[in-house]
Image (cartoon, rainbow, N blue to C red):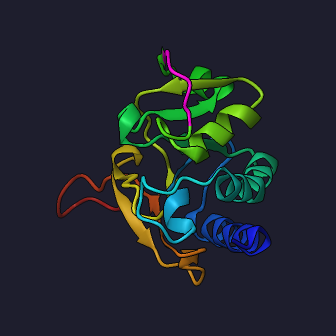
Amino acid sequence: MNTELIKQQAQSAVTELLSKAGLHVGDILVVGCSSSEIVGETIGHGSSIEAAEAVFEAIYPILKEQGIYLAAQCCEHLNRALIIERACAKAYGLEEVCVVPQPKAGGSFATTAWANFDAPVAVEEIRAQAGLDIGGTLIGMHLSRVAVPVRLEQNRIGDAILLAARTRPKYIGGIRARYE
């Protein structure tokens, strides 16, 4: 495993997504990250703290610098709960739940976020304005409506497939409505 390459790929992906997504200070970017898929294993069967740390170290400083909250999605063993900063929970009025992620119950990326956030908390759900799905972790349940796919040139991190999305407000109204 080449952690420097993983960092480079993750940094490239988040930078490109931020340039295309039109996020604002205080928005949330959800990341689902299968470290197993990054290292060439099947999701849930080869968790790698090293791969998760490489992704986290690459993307978190960029998001923090731009004032974007990171939400680290846990695996299905924690019902895809999210690890966020307490400030994010307060800003969005989110109810905390009591759990601490571990590599085999929450996943390596969520565990890494918990260890590195200033004041980590777990919440059951959010409505993020953009997201990165690294390795097929199914982040859609945590995106605001309406999710729009974002095609990134960087479409893999390690061996994992990378999908990205941004969101936009719903169009409402009818023939007389204007959207721009």
Give the percent coordinates (x, y) of residue 63: 72, 51
The C terminus sits in image quarter: bottom left
| Residue at the image position 41 percent from the left and 55 percent from the top | 137
Residue 23 lies within the magenta run: no
Give the percent coordinates (x, y) of residue 161: 47, 73
Q: Main secondary structure of the magenta part?
A: loop
Q: Residue 130, relative to residue 6: is it above or below?
A: above
The N terminus sits in image quarter: bottom right
| Residue at the image position 39 percent from the left and 47 percent from the top | 144
User: Residues in magenta?
Assistant: 97-102
Between 177 and 147, the residue placed more toward the observer is: 147
Between 79 and 3, the residue placed more toward the observer is: 3
From this viewpoint, is residue 132 visible?
Answer: no
Residue 99 lies within the magenta run: yes
Quadrant of the rendered image containing residue 114: top right
Is 115 placed left or right of 22 in the picture? Answer: right
Q: Residue 99, relative to residue 68: is it above or below?
A: above
| Residue at the image position 66 percent from the left and 39 percent from the top | 113
